[in-house]
Structures are given as C-alpha cells and as structure tokens.
C-alpha cells in the first residue's frame, strides 16, 4: 500500500482518532513518515512532515501499518513479535491501539 493510500485510510478513521489527543509519528523507513496530529479540533494527517516531533513514534513497515489500520494485525502481537517498535510514550501507543480496535 502506498503512502497516500495509508494517509487516506487514516483520514477515513479521523473521527475516532480525534479521541487520541496526542501526536503520533509513523516511521515507515524508506517508504516515508506519516504524522497523526489529534491535538486540535480536527485531526491532521501529514505525509512526510517537516518535523519529527511527536508524543510517540511507531516504527514499522508500510505493510504492517496497513494491516493495523484494517484491523488485520493486533498491535500488541506486532509489538511482541518485533514488527512494531515504540519510541516515546507507550501510554499514547496503547491508547491508539484501543482506538483502532473500535
């Protein structure tokens, strides 16, 4: 799945992601980065942002992010198996996990 398709997938879930109230950077390695900013009135999803500043950074492959967004990969299983690495607040990552399960 391409970066713009992942951004579109996140945009389709923006209403429930609004509850996060934090920023999350998805580091997809050579495929780029996506910033999820749910701190304002509207959720902003930015492909390849200028800054890496975020409350939490999740490092994973594009394929695994697509599976997470579709609900086909459990975030806890991905973390345990090493498919997902978390830098920064683990609490924010846990909250995001709960929102994706809704």
Image (tube, grey):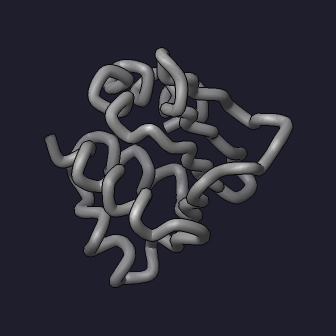
The answer to which quarter of the image holds residue 48 is: top right
**Left or right of residue 51: residue 5:** left
Tell me what residue is drawn at x 61 percent, y 49 percent.
25
Tell me what residue is drawn at x 26 percent, y 44 percent.
100
Expressed as whole percent of the image width and height from the top left, the position of residue 84 reads 46, 70
Tell me what residue is drawn at x 44 percent, y 38 percent.
21
Expressed as whole percent of the image width and height from the top left, the position of residue 79 reads 38, 75
Is 44 located above or below residue 39 in the figure? above
Name of the residue lying farthest toward the right: 50
Is 85 located above or below residue 67 in the figure? below
Expressed as whole percent of the image width and height from the top left, the position of residue 22 reads 50, 43
Is 50 located above or below residue 63 in the figure? above
Is 80 located above or below residue 7 in the figure? below
**Left or right of residue 78: residue 1:** right
**Left or right of residue 51: residue 75:** left
**Left or right of residue 70: residue 31:** right
Expressed as whole percent of the image width and height from the top left, the position of residue 9 reads 40, 27
**Placement of the C terminus among the 4 image quadrants:** top left
Tell me what residue is drawn at x 43 percent, y 57 percent.
92
Q: How many marks?
A: 0
């Amino acid at each position: 799945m391409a970066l713009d398709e992942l951004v579109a997938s996140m945009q389709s879930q923006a209403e429930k992601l609004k509850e996060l109230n934090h920023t999350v950077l998805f580091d997809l390695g050579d495929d780029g980065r996506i910033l999820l900013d749910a701190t304002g009135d509207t959720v902003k999803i930015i492909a390849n942002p200028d800054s890496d500043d975020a409350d939490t950074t999740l490092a994973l492959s594009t394929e695994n992010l697509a599976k997470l967004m579709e609900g086909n990969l459990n975030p806890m299983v991905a973390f345990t198996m090493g498919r997902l690495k978390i830098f920064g607040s683990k609490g924010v990552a846990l909250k995001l996990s709960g929102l994706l399960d809704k």
